[in-house]
Image (cartoon, rainbow, N blue to C red):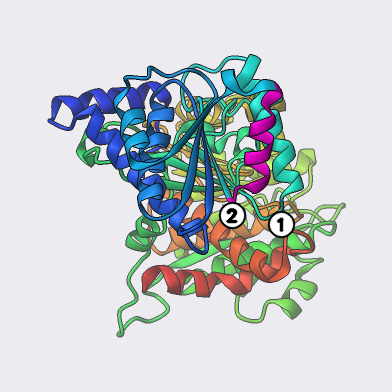
Amino acid sequence: MKIVTVEEMRGLEVASLSSGVSVDTLMENAGLAVANEVRKALDTIAGSRVLVLVGPGNNGGDGLVAARHLQRWGALVTAYLVLPRPEQGLKLGQARERGVSFLSASEDSALGALDGLLARSSLVMDAVLGTGRMRPLDGAVREVMLRLSVARKDNSEMTVMALDVPTGMDADTGEVDPACPQADVTVTFGYPKTGHFQFPGARKLGKLEVVDIGIRSHLAQDIKLDLLTGEWVGAKLPLRPLDAHKGTFGHALVVAGSPSYVGAAYLAAEGAARVGPGLVTLASPKGIYPILASKLTEVIHMPLPEDQDGGFDPEAAELISGEIQNYSSLLVGCGFGLSEGLTEFLSRLLLTEPQPSLPVVIDADGLINLSKIDGWWKKLKSPAVLTPHPGEMSTLTGVATPEIQARRTETALEWSARWGKVVVLKGAHSVIASPGGECQVSPYANPGLASGGTGDVLTGIIAGLMAQGLSPEDAAGCGVYLHGAAGEEVREGHGDAGTLAGDLVGALPRVVKSLKG
């Protein structure tokens, strides 16, 4: 599913008009779709009180169409005109004819009538400003939004539904006005907008519902920003023929661990094993091998020489390189620690000829150690996926973390192109960028995943998928989705707090099964 900017959405509407679908038809489709979402949100429509806060533009028109349908279905609908609309307007007139009640903020002394309507309503629809140019809220709009926020806190039974975005949110950047209300459901038209996946706006949406309004999909085919979906991932996951054997699904080599981060090696290897490769080998410093061997009985172990601190000795790189032709994918970096010796180890393993020809995923300390080598990305010839979190991305690029977070898709795309590698910028709504300019965004933002080790599981998943033949781009996209979906499954049972990285591992096969049908 494509993700669009406001300008791109306007372009699609213009193109749709040229293809024979009128603006009025799009608005009628949007309003009916919203009314159907209200039907889902309420236990019953007949007799329910619905308040529609109406703005002056197309967002308000969408709300009026929805009001008309809801009134026809038996709801008691009041349209509250926050800002004036032309009395001769078609949508307003049609809603009046259907029996929708009307009240205007300009006629509501001290907004007392609004307070009463808010207190009595089962659902309040925010159809005021939508995706128009973001500007500070003031006057009646600001006051109405503040009253809505108070009423939502006072009335736990009230549902707030925003159309496209809550009023006061920038649909491109996710920036919000202080008076922007919190929605329980946001219904967006045609395609999700870039701001839906940027914070702080993403917090204001509640559940995001994308509804079809009749824009033909081929009109958006050149847009390069996509939302990851289960349908896309299910189609990419490898088939499992009945006559398969362990050699059918590849062999992932996980190079990870140190005395301080034994768990990172365990989690990365488990993450890889749980998505279906035939074999996983874990290469770790020999000092921690006994611990890992007792925890991981299904993987093959490769104990390697260690340095004086218990990490990988640079000489270990030659031992791995001598066996590299036996593997289908390579993971490096999880739980390495930081030292000059580790930087030398990585240089010998990844940057020295002959380089490994298999795809590699590099995470965490692997990235930080590589960043100490000038022009490391020019020397790294292997097809690669880099998986930094924002802090690691800051170290790699020299760009401040807040700036990275404010421009997540742009940052990932820029540096993916510069480095010539696939970049997974982790975090809420992780971003996957490819050197060719394609970009995907995860639908998942889960605070339960904000705990140590979850990134190691993700890296393992990507390595496990690459071992089975997925391209680095597809493995990264599928890996991010599987990781997020597993997190959602765990969240349903555990809540937002207390999730451990190991909890994700057990959920992965069930998520894969659900996507493959």
Give the alpha-carbon distance from disc 1 to disc 2, as whole Å.
Answer: 18 Å
Give residue 116's quadrant in the image. top right
> Residue 34's spot in the image, x, y percent?
41, 45
Q: Which residues are magenta?
A: 110-122
Query: Is 454 displayed left or right of 72 in the figure?
Result: right
Which callout, 1 or 2, points to the residue nearer the camera?
1
Task: Please give the name of the residue rendered at 64% of the width and 43% of the height, measured from the top-left corner.
Answer: 427
Callout 2, which amino acid? Thr
Front position in the image: 403 or 15: 15
Any part of residue 398 in sight: no
Query: Is 502 displayed left or right of 442 in the figure?
Result: right
Query: Is 467 displayed left or right of 447 in the figure?
Result: left
Q: Residue furthest bottom?
A: 243
Residue topped by disc 1? 448
**Quadrant assignment for the C terminus:** bottom left
Looking at the rendered structure, which numbered label has been put on residue 246? none
Residue topped by disc 2? 459
Front position in the image: 285 or 210: 210
Classed neighbour count for the residue bearing mark 2: other residues with Cα under 10 Å, few (<14), some (14–19), many (≥20)? many
> Residue 413's spot in the image, x, y percent?
48, 29
Task: Please give the name of the residue rendered at 62% of the width and 74% of the height, measured from the top-left corner.
Answer: 506
Q: Are marks 1 and 2 in contact (CB under 8 Å)?
A: no
Front position in the image: 128 or 176: 128
